[in-house]
Image (cartoon, grey):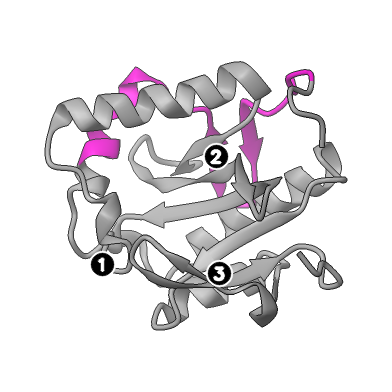
Amino acid sequence: MTADPAPVRDAEELRTGRLLLRRPGPEDLDAIFALHTDPEACAHNPSDLLETRKEAELLLLRWSHQWNRYGFGYWTVRRHDSAEPLGFCGVKIVGFRRRPVLNLFYRFFPSSWGAGYASEAAAAAVDWARVHRPDDLVIARVRPENVASQRVALRAGLVRAEHLDTPGDDGTDWLYVSDPGYEG
């Protein structure tokens, strides 16, 4: 992966069988704030909890910078038949072992858990990365006790890579990767 690749231009909206994934905008700020102040939604990543609306504004700004620089990032996820956000999912460039990789992120409102939305959105994000960023490794960092998130990573097409596990901000990160042969 080059340090500053040309932005991708066709990533602003993705559709799956049930979902619309769209680049977040100012209209999503309330959902960003609500989700990231929900202790249940952030139970496995308490360092992601926000306290103020200003922190949510800064988070949206960081997401927007990713989009502006690379042409992709995290999407707001909705059902086709609803304007209510279910959560957020996507990939962004992060450093991992002195190498840039695509970090798969998914966080959904607890009211939407158990319906397969996270798996559907995460699979769409990984599929998008495989088509548009085929040389980039996709990783998901998951807490050992977060079995539901582990299932999402597997359903998205990632594989468990125990040899890459690392300490994270909120405890051990189990790693799931798009390339089963990646040695790190």
Q: Which mark is residue 43?
A: 1
How many other residues sit within 10 Å of disc 2, few (<14), some (14-19) or many (≥20)? many
Is 135 on the left or on the right of 32, as rendered?
A: right
Lower position in the chain sequence, tag 1 or tag 3: 1
Residue that lies at the very extreme toward the front in this rendered image: 98
Q: Position of residue 114 (x, y in %)?
A: 41, 72
Lower position in the chain sequence, tag 2 or tag 3: 2
Mark 2: secondary structure:
strand
Residue 121 visible (yes or no): yes
Lower position in the chain sequence, tag 1 or tag 2: 2
Amino acid type, mark 1: Ala
Residue 24 visible (yes or no): no
Q: Which residue is mark 2?
A: 20
Q: Are marks 2 and 3 in contact (CB under 8 Å)?
A: no
How many other residues sit within 10 Å of disc 1, few (<14), some (14-19) or many (≥20)? few
Q: Position of residue 54 (x, y in %)?
A: 18, 25
Mark 3: secondary structure:
helix
Q: Quadrant of residue 62?
A: top left
From mark 2 to mark 3, how far is it between C-alphas? 18 Å
How many other residues sit within 10 Å of disc 3, few (<14), some (14-19) or many (≥20)? many
Q: Position of residue 3 (x, y in %)?
A: 75, 28
Which mark is nearer the camera, 2 or 3?
Answer: 3
From mark 1 to mark 3, how far is it between C-alphas? 16 Å
Mark 1: secondary structure:
loop
The residue lying at 53 percent from left, 64 percent from top is 141
Amino acid type, mark 2: Leu
